[in-house]
Image (spheres, rainbow, N blue to C red):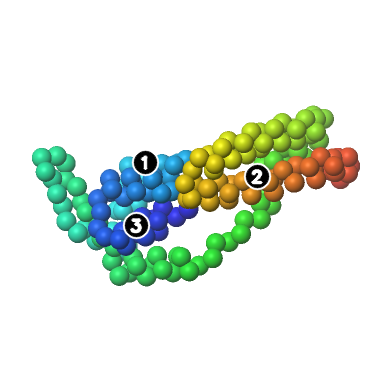
Amino acid sequence: MSIGHTLLGLLESGPRHGYDLKRTFDEKFGQDRPLHYGQVYATMSRLLKNGLVEVDGVESEGGPERKRYAITDAGITDVSTWLATPEKPEPYLQSTLYTKVVLALLTGRSAADLLDTQRSEHLRLMRTLTDRKRKGDLADQLICDHALFHLEADLRWLELAAARLDQLAKAVAP
């Protein structure tokens, strides 16, 4: 996810302080990975330097100075371009799981046990996500569906790999 583009998009509704941006980001997108304040301010500094935001005001109210950021026309154009650009599908051709299966075969360990353990972990996570989806709002349901569909594809691959272990062992043998 592009943190910079996401923060720019949040600024389109009006100027905000870094704290407000972090809070809104965490509510909408960061439930599983909230932003650190340092990440927000470093990103805002970079966006400011690149002319995508400007300081709309500074308040101190007895505490440290708080900058209020506003998106510039260049920032709006940048967000529009980003939103209109399709994400590159990730083919996962450098899969850690595949590497583990091959290394297990090459080192005489049980690739079948590895696949069974991984299958159990995928199913555990799928149960957790399904429960979260059931209790969540529409946004939570959609993000959980996205993750569940990817996990389902992984499970299909685990089954296929398990069915082909003998062939793979011969193919990777030294």
The residue labelled by disc 1 is: 36
Percent x, y for residue 114?
74, 32
The residues bearing labels 2 and 3 have C-alpha atoms spaced at a distance of 30 Å
Q: Name the image quarter holding residue 27.
A: top left
**On residue 14, which mark appears?**
none
Q: Name the image quarter holding residue 109.
A: top right
**On residue 151, which mark appears?**
2
**On residue 10, which mark appears?**
3
Front label number (1 vs 2): 2
Residue at figure coordinates x 25%, y 54% from the top left: 16
Q: Say how many tags the image has.
A: 3
Q: Secondary structure at mark 1?
A: loop
Q: Name the image quarter holding residue 168.
A: top right
The residues bearing labels 1 and 2 have C-alpha atoms spaced at a distance of 28 Å
Front label number (3 vs 1): 3
The residues bearing labels 3 and 1 have C-alpha atoms spaced at a distance of 17 Å
The residue carrying pointer 3 sits among few (fewer than 14), some (14 to 19) or many (20 or more) residues within 10 Å by Cα, namely some
Q: Is residue 27 above or below residue 84?
A: above
Q: Quadrant of the C terminus?
A: top right
Q: Is residue 148 above or below residue 114?
A: below
The residue carrying pointer 2 sits among few (fewer than 14), some (14 to 19) or many (20 or more) residues within 10 Å by Cα, namely some
Please, what is the three-letter code of the amino acid marked with disc 2? Leu
Please, what is the three-letter code of the amino acid marked with disc 1? His
Q: Is residue 91 visible?
A: yes
Residue at figure coordinates x 65%, y 44% from the top left: 151
In this view, which residue lies farthest toward the left?
62
Q: Is residue 49 visible?
A: no
Please, what is the three-letter code of the amino acid marked with disc 3? Leu
Percent x, y for residue 135?
50, 40
